[in-house]
Image (tube, rainbow, N blue to C red):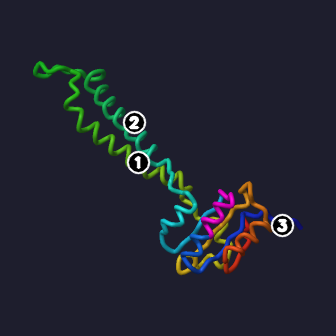
Amino acid sequence: MSRPALFGLMAEFDTPDGIVRASRAAHDAGYRRLDAYTPYPMEEVLDALHLHRTQVPKLVLAGGIFGLLFGFGLQYYCQVVSYALNIGGRPIASWLPWVVPSFETTVLFSAFAAVFGTLALCGFPQPYHPVFNVPEFARASRDRFFLCIEAADPRFDLDETRRLLHSLGAITVSEVQP
């Protein structure tokens, strides 16, 4: 019977300093497909893994520009193209009354882009992840720190990666099955 493909290796650490040192060392060793799991947010781990770059601001800007154009275009269509009325000798295509509704659609579409863009980029909702197959991972939300190096990483070699994680002071190193 053949073994199922391996998702990666997961190392368990008992101190915050241990996970920070291990994350930095694994990244310096050339691993790029790795993730850290901590019971509370740790800025040092994000720095060590170089995970600060995100595409969400660009999505929010695009959503805002689209919302502005949509709000302005909708009002232009309604008041100039579809139902043009000359009331009190005012110009039909006066943009001044359209500023506030255009601003509101900008904010609305920016908020939608932020929420749905974040969900899409994070891969949510994700009720299952292979790291849940490791029994020790149940302590990740209480008092343990975990570093998982995925087998999809180009530098991944089972024995070499296991030796690296043990040399970084891991309490245990577990294979993560998909």
Left or right placement of residue 86 versus residue 132 in this view: left
Q: Which residue is found at the position 23% from the left and 27% from the top?
A: 95
Amino acid on which the number 3 mark rests in the picture: Arg
The residue singled out by tag 1 in the image is: 112
Q: Earlier in the sequence, mark 3 or mark 1?
A: 3
Left or right placement of residue 70 versus residue 88 in this view: right
Is disc 2 in contact with disc 1, using a CB cutoff of under 8 Å? no
The residue singled out by tag 2 in the image is: 66
Q: Quadrant of the C terminus?
A: bottom right
Q: Earlier in the sequence, mark 2 or mark 1?
A: 2
Q: CA distance from mark 3 to mark 1?
A: 43 Å
- Tag 1's secondary structure? helix
Is disc 2 in contact with disc 3, using a CB cutoff of under 8 Å? no
> Is 131 a magenta residue?
no
The magenta span reads 22-32
Q: CA distance from mark 2 to mark 3?
A: 49 Å
Front residue (pair 147, 81) = 147
- Tag 3's secondary structure? loop
Amino acid on which the number 2 mark rests in the picture: Phe
Q: CA distance from mark 2 to mark 1?
A: 11 Å
The residue singled out by tag 3 in the image is: 3
Measured as percent of width and height from the top left, residue 144 is found at: 57, 78
Q: Quadrant of the N terminus?
A: bottom right
- Classified by dominant secondary structure, the portion drawn in magenta counts as helix
